[in-house]
Image (cartoon, rainbow, N blue to C red):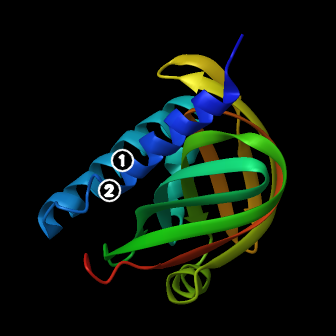
Amino acid sequence: MIDFSRLITMCLLALLLSACANQGANVAEQRTAVQKMKDDTLTKLFKQKPHTRAQIRSAAGFAVFSNASVNLFVASVGGGQGMVKNNQSGAITYMKMGELGVGFGLGVKDFRIVMVFDNKKTMDSFVDKGWVFGAQADAAAKASNKGSAIGAEAVVNGITIYQMTESGLALQALVKGAKFWRNEALN
């Protein structure tokens, strides 16, 4: 039988350690880590949904974020980092994200978000304002390449959003808000 309190404690510790992992890294190392995460995430997305390669190429720009979240019964918190790339200029904006939600569920999840911007105005607004609100319902039981996760694909106000679970154990139905903001230390 699974000891959920022990599992949650271990996952919280893992999240805390991963959140602190880049704190001592210099700016170049942190940028390299974000770029590697972006490359790995896009490779997986293109493999799962081949049409997204052309979609991203023809878009005004795109964003890729790594996020870890914890849901304990009625509250969910999470955070991560990523980058936005303007396809026309090639400019990259490094960003952070945080999220807070309420709903029912239990679990810990490490996931990736890819956002494809239909136009420059939408992309610029995201970089400058960064708020995204939404509801989420999902189930995940995945470790490494084993297990499965039901992810999400949505189109909201000119942004197509893909979510892919890397690892975690979660069953949740939430209403949550996410805030994205510039990572001044990396820009």
Disc 2 secondary structure class: helix
From the viewer's perspective, tell me whether residue 112 is left or right of residue 76.
Answer: left
Left or right, residue 185 beside residue 126: left
Q: Position of residue 128 (x, y in %)?
A: 51, 89
- Quadrant of residue 120 in the image? bottom right
Q: Which residue is mark 1?
A: 17
The answer to whether residue 44 is left or right of residue 48 is: left
Please state the horizontal and vertical placement of residue 95, each as a whole percent of the image. Answer: 41, 73
**Mark 2 nearby-residue class (10 Å; few <14, some 14–19, many ≥20):** few
- Amino acid beneath label 1: Leu
Image point (17%, 61%), residue name: 24
Q: CA distance from mark 2 to mark 1?
A: 5 Å
Q: Quadrant of the C terminus?
A: bottom left
Q: Nearer the viewer, residue 47 or 54?
A: 47
How packed is label 1: few (under 14 Cα within 10 Å), some, or many (20 or more)?
few
Mark 2 highlights which residue? 20
Callout 2–callout 1 Cβ contact below 8 Å? yes
